[in-house]
Image (cartoon, coloured by chain):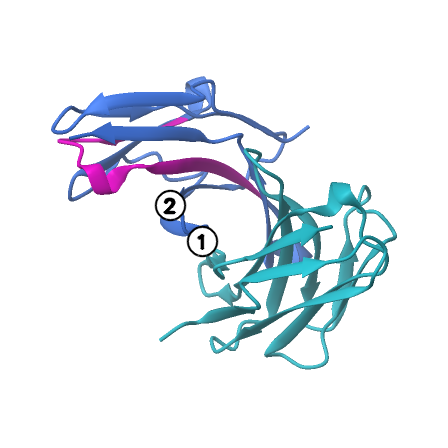
Amino acid sequence: DAMVIQNPRYQVTQFGKPVTLSCSQTLNHNVMYWYQQKSSQAPKLLFHYYDKDFNNEADTPDNFQSRRPNTSFCFLDIRSPGLGDAAMYLCATSRLAGTGTTEAFFGQGTRLTVV
Amino acid sequence: AQKVTQAQTEISVVEKEDVTLDCVYETRDTTYYLFWYKQPPSGELVFLIRRNSFDEQNEISGRYSWNFQKSTSSFNFTITASQVVDSAVYFCALSELNYGGATNKLIFGTGTLLAVQP
């Protein structure tokens, strides 16, 4: 019954080696978000898609990119991971409902380790 | 600027005690949402409640209750008769609405780690 699915749950990558994290949803929500959560910190929004419109946060490094090929899937690409990019990456979705936007539904996250 | 403050970094209680988690927010918007999420050790963020800025009614759901006071910009969360399974990090969040309210950027507080001892 998983609604927001992130793969893999754990990812180890080498310093500087491109890595892609994936997120899929079965909710048919039109908004998808990527958050970065470093150890013992609050999640921080990197970017989000409203349908096909991409919205980057002003302080998101250029090293982070995203793709949304269709409603169900969204990818986070880290072009050259550094040690400081080790974190939990959380995908979330929401949709516009009659009373406004719904709450965000989160996946289980992908914990990225950079070695 | 939008900001959420959770002053309590860690709280430790014994099972069956009541506990209140504090949340204070800052925003210039007149329309906004406030949320509480639970993050157990497994990592996913579990939605607990959403409250919009025009609804100051307090809410109770089982052992959970929320007190929203716009006058003090606070949205506090109380767990009654705490249980070991309540142990987690709890995040308060404020939404920033874009696209006329269609998207929901969450600004999180730093979280409160609740440890419930048996």
Measured as percent of width and height from the top left, residue B68 is found at: 35, 30
Residue A91: x percent and y percent?
58, 60
Magenta span of residues: B75-95
Lateral position of residue B27 relative to residue B117, left or right: right
Q: Chain of mark 2?
A: B
The secondary structure type at the circle numbered 1 is: loop
- Decide whether residue A47 is among the magenta residues: no
Pointer 2 with pointer 1, Cβ within 8 A: yes
Residue shown at 73%/50% (left/top)?
A: A115
Judging from the image, mark 1 belongs to the subunit labelled B
Which residue is nearer to you in this view: A57 or A89? A89
Decide whether residue B90 is among the magenta residues.
Answer: yes
Foreground residue, A49 or B112?
B112
Question: Alpha-carbon distance for marks 2 and 1?
Answer: 7 Å
For label 1, the residue is B44
Query: Could you tell me residue B1's position as x and y percent?
Result: 68, 28
Q: Quadrant of residue B55?
A: top left
Q: Which mark is residue B40?
A: 2
Q: Amino acid at mark 2?
A: Pro
Horizontally, residue A88 falls left or right of residue B47, namely right
Q: Residues within 10 Å of mark 2 (few under 14, many from 20)?
A: some
Q: Position of residue B67 (x, y in %)?
A: 30, 29
Magenta region's main secondary structure? Answer: strand
